[in-house]
Amino acid sequence: MRQALITFAILVAVGSATAAAFDIKGDPVGYLEGKWHIGKKWYCPGMCAMDEAAAKAFRGRSFEYSGARMSNGQKTCGSPKYVIRRLSAEQFFRDYRCAPEDIGLLGKVVKEISVECEESGVIWPTVGNLALIKNRGTFLTLWDGVFFEVHRD
């Protein structure tokens, strides 16, 4: 069996009054802990590999985070590792080909939380490998160029 490295990134916009109120500092698990689901709103700031009907099909998908596990509703990681990285708006643009404000994120600094999982034989499903935090109860997850809003349950 082969080892699969699974990366799930969460980006947190910092700099607005809302962002400052929930700054995660060094505890990404504390911020993410709990259950989340994909809502109705989505952004396509550039080229998207799915049409509106395909994007709507992602509504309702769920995520669950804790220090001991991470699940996206289809697959589960039993040994997640959460890592924070700080990005300037310019670095965010270089990495993701859009400005944070193009997808509703405010501020000049973005925090990225990566959740890595090494488990034998695990193939991570499509949605859930990247997300961006908008506020205390909402983040965006990225797939095929579409950023989907995800809400805390």
Image: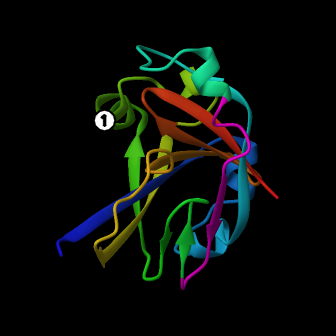
Q: Nearer the viewer, residue 72 or 41?
A: 72
Please determine whether, in this image, residue 35 is positioned above or below residue 147. Answer: below
> Farthest residue in the front direction?
1
Q: Residues within 10 Å of mark 1 (few under 14, many from 20)?
A: few
Q: Nearer the viewer, residue 84 or 56?
A: 56
- Residue in the image at 55% along x and 21% along y: 102
Q: Quadrant of residue 17?
A: top right
Give the structural element (helix, strand or loop) at label 1: helix
> Farthest residue in the right direction?
153
Q: Is residue 38 left or right of residue 72?
A: right
Q: Position of residue 50 (x, y in %)?
A: 49, 20
Highlighted magenta segment, given as a residue range: 57-68
Q: Quadrant of the C terminus?
A: bottom right
Q: Quadrant of the N terminus?
A: bottom left
Q: Position of residue 144 (x, y in %)?
A: 42, 29
Q: Nearer the viewer, residue 55 or 32?
A: 55
Q: Position of residue 101 (x, y in %)?
A: 57, 25
| Numbered-mark total | 1
Q: Position of residue 37 (x, y in %)?
A: 72, 51
- Determine if the magenta segment contains residue 67: yes
- Residue in the image at 50% along x and 17% along y: 45
Secondary structure predominantly adopted by residues drawn in magenta: loop
Q: Amino acid at mark 1?
A: Asp
Q: Which residue is mark 1?
A: 95
- Residue in the image at 46% along x and 36% along y: 143
Q: Is residue 74 left or right of residue 119?
A: right
